[in-house]
Image (cartoon, rainbow, N blue to C red):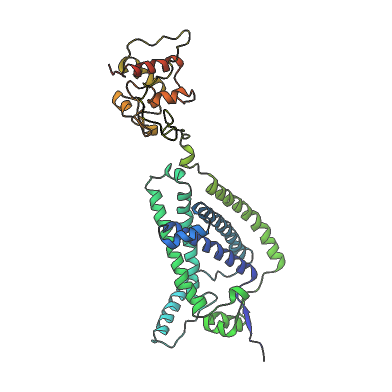
Amino acid sequence: MEKPRSYLRFPVSYRIEHWVLTISFFLLSVTGIVQKYPDLGFMRWLIGIMGGIEATRLIHHLSAIVLMFLTIYHIGIVGYRMFVLRQRLTMLPGKKDLTNAIDLLKHNLGRSKKRAQQGRYTFEEKLEYWAVVWGTVVMGITGFMLWNPIATTKILPGEIVPAAKAAHGNEALLAVLAIVIWHLWHVHVRHWNMSMFKGHLTEEEMEDEHPAELARIRTGKIDPAPAREVVAKRRRVYLPIFAVLAAVMLVGIWFFIGYETTAVTTLPPAEDVTVFVHLTPTPLPTALPTSTPAPTSLPTVAAPAGEQEPAVESSWDIDISPLMAKSCVACHSSSNKMGGLDLSSYQAALAGGASGAAIVPGEVQTSLLISRQASGQHPGQFSAGDLALVQHWIEIGAPEK
């Protein structure tokens, strides 16, 4: 039996490019959708399968980088076919695509026996191609904004970041639905197209899907290949130009993935805070109740030579407020309440912070301000004389005036 005649549809380079795009798109889709809908049980399961949310984001970013490199390659190869080989731009849409769409609609509705005479690429394939181009541009721009939010908001208003997040997620969802509903139907459900696996279509498949292109081949209207010396001459001009363009785009990718200094790294280092410490350990088993001994004060720190001894009577307004303004208010003010603590006023200081009471009148041992300073390692460390002054002020009841 004679083997059916076949026609080359996609060379190896086309197929490799297509499968790299397919894999990167699949990974971007899966890792992106689970981040868009993280509260769904199935999405949580997928995040766990991929190693957690941080691993999911890493896979998403690496897949995006692969897509960026593939974009540079595609630009280069399209330019090579256009300027060096001078091939026809068969993927550009035209009026014929509109008439083909109308003819196909009429044929599918039974209103016409005339079939759409489609060429090398059908109008459906052109729609898909340019949808990928449009989607890549949108995803690239919005992806940069999400990857580099601080750099973005230095130029644009802050509202652009949540807007970019909405556009990025919705465009991705639209792309996934288009592939599942449109592409899979035409390529794998309606008719299993093997051209992206084998590179060829049979004559029957060509007559069904690309009759105009088959007619060109049968009548010998095939674009002649340019002479080797002409190709070599054009290549010598094109390759240096594209090399410069590719270098610029590679710098752009490097800028894309490495520019941002995130907000997390700009925060001051966390402060170690003791939440609760037993004043006296309780022995086991518990002994019989006894009278609680009077609490002892922390040892008074003597002022070194040359510094003023604490006054017998001290007050917030006269002694303590200037000291707080000098050493503490830079980090503990009404506008910058590190640890929830504000030391810019008497009432705010007594209110304490997130860890508890900073100043407890009459109780030096339970005042967190003293315990933090006693370590000698606090960023706004008091001198020995200043610490003694504050300790004395608390001991006499922390008066305001």
Residue 100 position within the rendered picture, expressed as x and y whole percent measured from the top left: 45, 78
Residue 136: in sight, yes or no? no
Q: Position of residue 42 (x, y in %)?
A: 44, 63
Residue 105, image x and y in percent? Answer: 41, 80
User: In the image, 55: left or right of 317?
Assistant: right
For the N terminus, the quadrant is: bottom right
Q: Residue furthest right?
A: 229
Compared to 354, does 369 lie above or below? Answer: above
- Does 74 sit above or below residue 248? below
- Judge whether residue 96 can be spotted in this image: yes
Frontmost residue, 78 versus 49 = 49
Q: On screen, 104 above or below 56? A: below
Quarter location, residue 15: bottom right
Q: Residue furthest left?
A: 401
Give the quadrant of residue 318: top left
Which of the pair 385/12 is nearer the observer?
385
The structure residue drawn at horizontal position 39% and vertical position 23%, both measured from the top left corner, is: 365
Which residue is drawn at the image coordinates 47% and 84% (left, top)? 115
Query: Residue 244: where, in percent of width, then height?
Result: 62, 51
Number of marks? 0
Q: Residue furthest front?
A: 288
Q: Nearer the viewer, residue 254 or 344?
A: 344
**Quadrant (top left/top right/bottom left/bottom right) for the C terminus:** top left
| Residue at the farthest top position | 306
Between 199 and 267, which is closer to the camera in this rendering?
Answer: 267
